[in-house]
Amino acid sequence: MSPFEGQRYTSPASSGDAARPVPDEDALAREFWDRIRLFAARRLDDVAAAEDVAQETLRRVLEALRGGRIENQLALPAFVYQTARHICLQRYRSSGREMRALGRLHGGMPAAEPSDALTALITEERRAAVRAAVARLDEHDRELLRLVFVEAMDTGELASRMALTRGALRVRKHRALGRLAQLLGTIDPDDEEGEAKRLGTSGNTTT
Amino acid sequence: MTMPVLTCERVDDEQLDARYAAGALGEAEADAFEAHYFGCARCWGRVQRAVELRDGLAAAAPIPRSARPSVTRRWWPLGAAAAIAAGVLLTRHGARSSQAGGIEATRGDTGKWVPHASATPDSAALTWTRVMDADLYRIRLLAADGRLLLERTTRDTVLTLPRDSVPTAAYWDVTALDPLREVLRQSAPTPAGAP
């Protein structure tokens, strides 16, 4: 049972409508499905379990909306998050696993080792496109982004290592991301022949 | 447990998206970030980007040692780098501003980017001007109370729907995204009811 059973989110300016329209289920799913799935996959390290959590979360949220228990639409994201969090906790308790399998890793996971559950959420097509774009990226841009996204270096530490101010580091990072976005934008996922050629060419990273 | 207050600027400054995807945030900070991105399209896009980039960068060939950042050999002195970077930032801002109506896109400013809604007895259409560097547009139809009615994505600059699926008292908003799902521009709410 949701921790929010019977609780109402009230708005200072309630519309007072007696008959509130039923929310669009498809819109709700589009808005929150991927967020819940990623959040749960990170917590549970299990894509199938994450999808179960997403389904159950949306079911409860829809139930709450239809029951008029969420009157302030601005509170909806927080309600969805807390519901998903509660369901994850319920699953963890019922499975009997230790807290460390569910909770934060506290830096224990090697930064260079991506979570299988998270990467499994990315489509193969998207992974291939991003990898191809990264392979074409200037090596200095690639190294900067690797330190940011793979090593997950602290901003201060990274700025110090590069002898930059935090502001200058921010600019460099955004420029590198901009160049990567341009490369990604030039890769047409429907152009199979061109894509194969690009991957074949870009695979030769040693120059 | 009191969660620290989070803003999009702080997410960017402290690279919370990258550190979250890497599992490098403390529990309270991760909780706060999760609560934030559930309600923030911009930071949600950044989380997705971080997950994708971790995979793409981890799979890339090792960087030659000569290309790795070195204080003495590669990177310019602090002052020069900052001055050059500031000049580049201003130049990019100016270029983007002149082409995008004078508004800095990355701040999610609603500015002057206003889609145009029209309707016939059978259909409702929304059109908007193309945003520089945009790869995808996300269109949402919202009820007057903010409730999300529908959401669509397109690479085109027009969306057409059956007339009866678009309530007159609803609002459109359009978000322009780059290939890495970074929010480039956010439109002002546009009434769905045609004048």
Image (cartoon, rainbow, N blue to C red):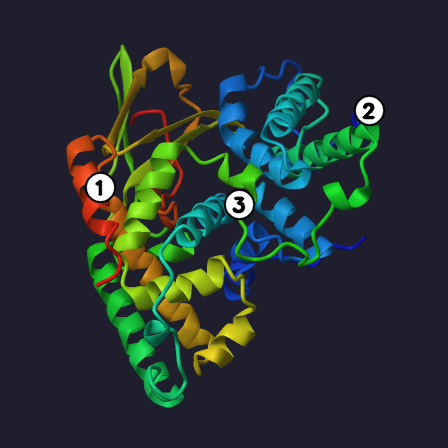
x and y, in percent, of residue A76 in the image:
63, 33
Residue that mark 3 sits on: B40
Residue type pointed to by label 1: Thr
Is residue A141 in view?
yes
Q: Which of A121/A33 is in front?
A: A121
Front residue of A195/B9: it is: A195
Closest to the observer, B140 or B29: B29
Question: Mark 1 touching mark 2, by CB under 8 A?
Answer: no
Q: Quadrant of the N terminus of chain A?
A: top right
Q: What chain is tagged by disc 3?
A: B
Q: Position of residue A32 (x, y in %)?
A: 55, 31
Marks 3 and 1 belong to one chain:
yes
Binning the other alpha carbons within 10 Å of mark 3 as few (below 14), some (14 to 19) or many (20 upward) gives some
- Is the same chain shared between marks 1 and 2? no
Determine whether the residue tagged by mark 2 lies in a helix, strand or loop.
loop
Q: Which mark is residue A6?
A: 2
* Secondary-structure class at tag 1: loop
Q: Residues within 10 Å of mark 1 (few under 14, many from 20)?
A: few
Q: What residue is rendered at 32% in x and 53% in y?
A: A134
